[in-house]
Structures are given as C-alpha cells and as structure tokens.
Amino acid sequence: MSDVQLAQCLYRYLLFRSFCHFELGGDVPEASILGRFRTRLVDHHPWDKLLVDINRQLEAKNIIMSEGRINIIDATPIEATQSDSGNKKIGEPTQNSESGWHVNNNLHSHAIST
C-alpha cells in the first residue's frame, strides 16, 4: 500500500488507527510524514529483527505458517449430534436433519463438516 493509501485508510478506518496505536479521535499523519518514516525504517534495516519477533509471536499462539500459504486452524470443540442414521429407542432418527457432510474435490481441500 502506498503512503497516500495508508494515510487515507488511517483517516477513514478506525481499525487502521487502532492497529497503529493512534488515538481513535485524534489526527493522523499525512502521506509525506509516513513516507519519511518508511524511508528511515528502510535505512536502518530492521527486517531481520522484526521477522524474528513476528515468528516468535506466531509460535507463542500456535500459528503455523508455511511458505506461500496461510493456514488458519480453529480447533474449538463444539457440541454436535450423532452423524449416523441410526434410530433412538422411540424410533426417531438420531441424525440432526440440518447437519451433514461434504467432500470438496479440490486437490488442496479435505472433507468439510457442515
């Protein structure tokens, strides 16, 4: 994103201000100020130190990154009904009528519960 685009996003979107730790109701820097700041960052070559810190933070949150892909894993346990088509003792099916499963034939996908 260019310096001008960043300045516009900081002006328009509270999420950008929050992420950059600017006051939500305060002023935001102009594109020229952002450009000078970016230039100073590039001159000091902070990338190796930043990458080490980012990887440490990702590892602490058990986020696994692989080159060229983003993997988001949500292992939140949820309560679910049985998925078989068996019957209860009273003759009612045990399967939830709104549940099911789907297989995506895409080479990069696996079975997805719905």
Image: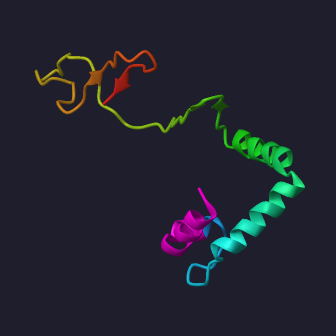
Q: For the point 73% across and 43% down, which residue is it?
A: 60
Task: Tell me which segment is drawn in magenta.
Answer: 1-17
Of helix, strand and loop, which mostly describes the magenta segment? helix
Give the answer, above or below, for where 38 lies relative to 21. Answer: above
Q: Which residue corresponds to the image point at 86% horizontal and 47% vertical from the top-left?
A: 49
Question: Hey, which quadrant is residue 85 in on the image?
Answer: top left
Please state the horizontal and vertical placement of residue 11, each as a whole percent of the image: 53, 75
Residue 93 shown left or right of residue 48 in the figure: left
Q: Position of residue 88 (x, y in %)?
A: 18, 22
* Viewport quadrant of the C terminus: top left
Q: Is residue 107 left or right of residue 8?
A: left
Q: Residue at x 46, y 19 (%)?
A: 108
Picture coordinates of residue 42, whole percent (x, y):
81, 55
Determine the image quadrant of residue 106: top left
Q: Is residue 110 above or below residue 44?
A: above
- Location of residue 67 (image quadrant): top right
Task: Give left or right: position of 5 versus 97.
Answer: right
Whether the magenta-drawn stretch holds residue 56 is answered as: no
